[in-house]
Structures are given as C-alpha cells and as structure tokens.
Image: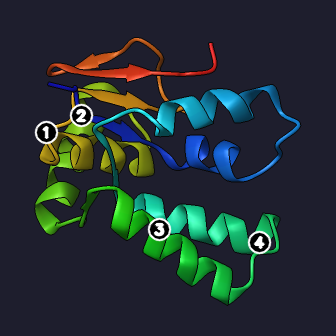
Amino acid sequence: MSVSSFVDSNVWLYAFMDESSPKHQQALTVIAQPGVTLSTQVVNEVCNNLLRKAGYTEQEIRQTVENFRQRYPIHAVTLDDVRRASELRESFSLSYWDSLVVASAIAADCRIIYSEDMHHGLNINGLQLLNPFV
C-alpha cells in the first residue's frame, strides 16, 4: 500500500515550468509517485501562476485542470479546513495559506506534504512536511 502524499503548488510549478532548473526533474519524480493528492487551493495557485508567469492560454489552463481531475484525487477545501487551519496557525506558527494546505492534507488522510515553502522535517500530528529539493 502506498502512502498518500500531498503536493504543494510550488512543486507542481517546478514540474510544469523551467525545464532547465535542477528542481524540474525532482518535481517530476515527486508527482509521479503513487498516492499523490492535491486540493482546489493548489489547483488555483498553479493555474494562476501558469497564466501569469508561464503565459498559459485559457485553453491550456482548462486542459491542465482536466488533467489534474483525471489523474489525481483533489480535495475540495471546506469551511472545516479553514477552521482547522486557524488552529494549526496557533499551534505551529504557519502562514495562512500554508496552514490551509496542511489542513487539507490532514482532511485527505495524507501522511506527507511535499513543499518547498514549509518547515522541512516538521511533523504535525503524524503528517510529515518534506522539502523534496533539500
């Protein structure tokens, strides 16, 4: 049985953009693992950055969303996640958006979060935060 992992938007962006970056191949390795999950928040962040920074067209964005939908479980962020995120901010000094990623990963029963932006090695109630680029 594979461990479910939540992949944050920064890892997806390395996979989609800048093939010359050494982080590109590592990001591709992370998203190719079985059990990868993401949230509607991550889809939104990825699409916004692909539009602004990579010059994606709206058609390319729609195709990206469809590819996500077909290939990965996507957790829809709920008000319960927003409440839990608030509790996580109090306990772990996370940013607003990072706490919502963590809350979504917990709700989706993930055991690992891959993110470049969070505290590498931090364990939050059995959820391990890992930076795949260290």
Q: Which residue is mark 4?
A: 52
Find out whether the residues at labels 4 and 3 contact each other: C-beta distance under 8 Å.
Answer: no
Query: On the picture, is 102 further left or further right than 56?
Result: left
Q: CA distance from mark 1 to mark 3?
A: 22 Å
Measure how far apart labels 2 and 1 are at the Cα level.
7 Å
- Residue type, mark 1 in image: Asp
43 in relation to 55, above or below: above
Q: Label 2, on which residue?
A: 4
Cα separation between marks 2 and 3: 19 Å
| CB atoms of marks 2 and 3 within 8 Å | no
What residue is shown with label 1?
A: 109
Q: Amino acid at mark 3?
A: Asn
Distance, label 2 to label 4, CA atoms, is: 30 Å
Q: Does the CB distance between marks 1 and 4 fall below 8 Å?
A: no
- Looking at the rendered structure, the secondary structure element under dot 1 is loop
Task: Identify the residue shown where x is 56% and y is 78%.
Answer: 63
Q: Earlier in the sequence, mark 2 or mark 4?
A: 2
First of labels 1, 3 by sequence position: 3
Q: How far apart in space, not on screen, are marks 4 and 3 (Cα)?
A: 20 Å
Q: Which residue is mark 3?
A: 67
Q: Secondary structure at mark 2?
A: loop
